[in-house]
Image (spheres, rainbow, N blue to C red):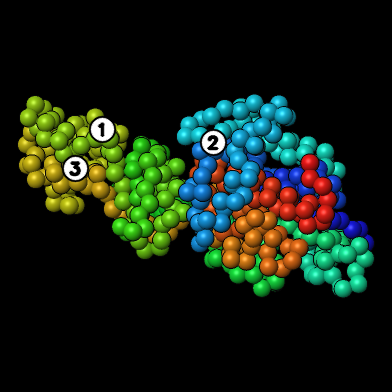
């Protein structure tokens, strides 16, 4: 039976980074992953260029049942620390907007950095290799092993186990509930997982008037929640055949609750009522043509056509439209309240919200109440906004874990 100081289950962003950091601090580390390809979620992220962090990361960019949990790890490994690592490996990158950093060339550059760090730490990687079971070792185990793993490549003993298996998002690249099952096995509480950063869908009959707008995008303000729990984002919106997507919708989806509405301002930088009343005094154009000054043409036409269903005079020249109808149109454009009937689910969700409850974890070390068992990355109930925040959580939680592993095993840090 082979022995390791640490076995990391999951060869994604958090798992590989933790393994490399722990290995470089003198620990004997094994990484195991059931998937054939390493770090596939990194490879497909950011349109293939990987939005690997966000320079403006703060704890406010994350949601969790304990919003303060992420503070310690994020403060001890910052976006600039990861940027320094990329400089060390010669990876070129750029800021797109709002602090979002992307690789100039390819997401493959990030994967190669992680693998290079693992090589420097003499990390062993078994992939593809399934973990069949994880159990505590008997009291007289050799090498002071705490855990035994049955794997497709044989049994393994180790002193600590790190679960970095991610969530349920994008099952086609190998997502599973392994991490949640391990937590449950050792009596650790879970926050119910749910798709996050995911497109929203609507009842087909209700959405029929807007399905033809699929592919249309525009900047909006999008919000959800009540007065005390309201959350809003200023981002782009994308119409789809089944509902809404785009950065704004992905952001709000993490906060949206079933059977509650979302609120959209389709022209957040314009006083539509004032503009329409001014147009009425000078124009003989159709109302839809005037709307096209502030909304995409197709959306302006669709909005004007909605007037019949709402008993509003929106299908005529703006000069012939009653002021009351113009105010009603402006109000609907600036506060369009609609209720999704669901989401596109894990197949299109970028991340999984919920997961292993932070009640059972140390924010300093990521160790659970089960001694020697750690959880990092997406499997934990810490979920970032769209824009590189989830990768930064992966790096920060992995770094905190690696430091703790080295300290707990009485090895010097570097």
Q: What label sits on residue 55 in the rendered view?
A: 2
Q: How far apart are the alpha carbons under marks 1 and 2?
A: 32 Å
Vertical side of 312 occupied by 366: above or below: below
Vertical side of 301 occupied by 181: above or below: below
Residue drawn 7% across the image and 42% down it: 322
Comparing 203 with 345, the one in front is 345
Q: Quadrant of residue 25 in the image?
A: top right
Can residue 333 be seen in the rendering of this structure?
yes
**Secondary structure at numbered mark 1:** loop
- Residue topped by disc 3: 330
Q: What label sits on residue 294 in the rendered view?
A: 1
**Secondary structure at numbered mark 3:** helix
Can residue 151 be seen in the rendering of this structure?
no
Residue drawn 62% across the image and 66% down it: 360
Of pointers 1 and 3, the one earlier in the residue sequence: 1
Q: Nearer the viewer, mark 2 or mark 3?
A: 2
Residue drawn 17% across the image and 52% down it: 310
Comparing 408 with 105, the one in front is 408
Q: Position of residue 203 (x, y in %)?
A: 36, 58
Of pointers 2 and 3, the one earlier in the residue sequence: 2
**Secondary structure at numbered mark 2:** loop
Comparing 71 with 319, the one in front is 71
* Left or right: 25 as drawn, with respect to 365: right
Residue drawn 79% across the image and 45% down it: 413
């Amino acid at each position: 039976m082979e022995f390791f100081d640490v076995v990391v289950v999951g060869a994604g962003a958090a798992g590989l980074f933790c393994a490399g950091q722990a290995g470089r601090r003198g620990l004997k580390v094994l990484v195991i992953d059931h998937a054939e390809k390493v770090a596939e979620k990194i490879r497909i992220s950011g349109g293939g260029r990987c939005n690997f962090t966000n320079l403006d990361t703060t704890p406010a960019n994350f949601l969790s049942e304990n919003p303060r949990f992420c503070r310690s790890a994020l403060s001890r490994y910052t976006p600039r620390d990861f940027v320094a690592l990329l400089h060390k490996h010669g990876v070129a990158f750029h800021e797109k907007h709002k602090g979002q950093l992307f690789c100039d060339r390819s997401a493959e550059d990030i994967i190669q950095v992680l693998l290079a760090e693992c090589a420097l730490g003499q990390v062993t990687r078994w992939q593809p290799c399934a973990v069949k079971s994880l159990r505590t070792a008997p009291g007289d185990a050799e090498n002071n092993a705490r855990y035994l793993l049955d794997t497709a490549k044989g049994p393994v003993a180790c002193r600590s186990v790190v679960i970095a298996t991610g969530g349920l998002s994008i099952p086609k690249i190998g997502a599973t509930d392994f991490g949640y099952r391990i937590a449950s096995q050792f009596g650790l509480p879970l926050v119910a997982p749910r798709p996050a950063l995911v497109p929203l869908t609507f009842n087909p009959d209700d959405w029929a008037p807007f399905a033809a707008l699929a592919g249309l995008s525009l900047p909006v303000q999008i919000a959800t929640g009540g007065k005390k729990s309201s959350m809003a984002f200023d981002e782009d919106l994308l119409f789809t055949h089944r509902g809404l997507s785009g950065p704004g919708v992905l952001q709000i989806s993490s906060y949206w609750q079933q059977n509650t509405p979302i609120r959209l301002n389709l022209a957040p930088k314009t006083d539509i009522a004032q503009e329409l009343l001014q147009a009425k005094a000078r124009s003989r154009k159709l109302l839809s043509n005037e709307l096209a000054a502030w909304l995409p043409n197709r959306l302006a036409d669709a909005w004007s056509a909605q007037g019949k269903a709402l008993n509003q005079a929106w299908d005529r020249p703006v000069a012939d439209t009653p002021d009351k109808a113009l105010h009603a149109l402006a109000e609907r454009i600036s506060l369009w309240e609609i209720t999704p009937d669901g989401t596109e689910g894990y197949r299109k969700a970028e991340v999984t919200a919920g997961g292993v409850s932070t009640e059972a974890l140390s924010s300093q070390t990521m160790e659970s109440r089960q001694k020697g068992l750690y959880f990092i990355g997406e499997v934990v109930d810490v979920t970032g906004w769209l824009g590189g925040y989830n990768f930064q959580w992966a790096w920060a939680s992995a770094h905190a874990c690696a430091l703790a592993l080295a300290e707990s095993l009485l090895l010097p840090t570097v």
